[in-house]
């Protein structure tokens, strides 16, 4: 069983920065793609950014040039550095990890709240 623990959310003023982290723990697994999603109040969860096992990253247009996703395979972590935050970035942020063990499974973090005030 793999567990994902997120940290780093909080309240920030527009234009500010936050860094989210997500750490995977467990035994006998290998991580493939790692991603971040977010869900604003009353809206569906949306994809934010992805980093592949080969360290290729992709971003939603709404966060491109402001957010940076990175991974540390030695620590089984994925990070999201968020800059120039806007009120519309407010929501619960979830990490999403594809794990290769006995089978290929998708895991979600518990979510961390990000609130950007205007």
Image (cartoon, grey):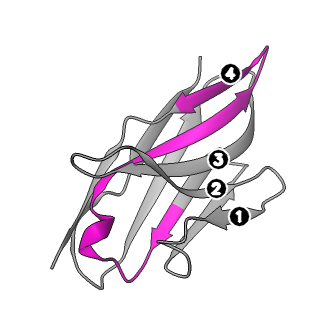
Q: Which residue is mark 2?
A: 50
Q: Main secondary structure of the magenta part?
A: strand
Name the outermost residue toward the left: 118
Give the extent of the magenta segment. Answer: 80-107
Horizontally, residue 105 falls left or right of residue 49, namely: right
Q: Is residue 44 above or below residue 105?
A: below
Q: CA distance from mark 3 to mark 1?
A: 10 Å
Discs 3, 2 touching: Cβ within 8 Å: yes
Is residue 97 rendered magenta in the image? yes
- The answer to whether the residues at label 3 and label 4 have Cβ atoms under 8 Å apart is no
Q: Residue at x 58, y 24 (%)?
A: 2
- What's the mark number on residue 34? 3
Query: Is 70 situated left or right of 11 in this image?
Result: right
Whole-percent x and y of residue 86? 30, 77
Dot 4 and dot 1 residues touching (CB under 8 Å)? no
State which tag comes first along the sequence, 3 or 2: 3
Classed neighbour count for the residue bearing mark 2: other residues with Cα under 10 Å, few (<14), some (14–19), many (≥20): many
Residue 22 vertical position relative to residue 102 in the rendered view, above or below:
below
* Element at label 2: strand
Q: Nearer the viewer, mark 4 or mark 2?
A: 2
Q: Are marks 2 and 1 in contact (CB under 8 Å)?
A: yes
Identify the residue under disc 4: 27
Q: What quarter of the picture does the N terminus occupy? A: top right
Between the C-alphas of marks 2 and 1, the distance is 5 Å
Q: CA distance from mark 4 to mark 1?
A: 26 Å
């Amino acid at each position: 069983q793999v567990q994902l623990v997120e940290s780093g959310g909080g309240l920030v003023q527009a234009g500010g920065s936050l860094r989210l982290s997500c750490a995977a723990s467990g035994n006998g697994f290998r991580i493939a793609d790692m991603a971040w999603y977010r869900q604003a109040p009353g809206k569906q969860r949306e994809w934010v950014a992805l980093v592949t096992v080969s360290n290729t990253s992709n971003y939603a247009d709404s966060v491109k040039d402001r957010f940076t996703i990175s991974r540390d395979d030695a620590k089984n972590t994925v990070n999201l550095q968020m800059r120039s935050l806007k009120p519309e970035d407010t929501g619960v942020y979830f990490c999403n990890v594809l794990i290769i063990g006995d089978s290929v499974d998708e895991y979600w973090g518990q979510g961390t709240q990000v609130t950007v005030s205007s």
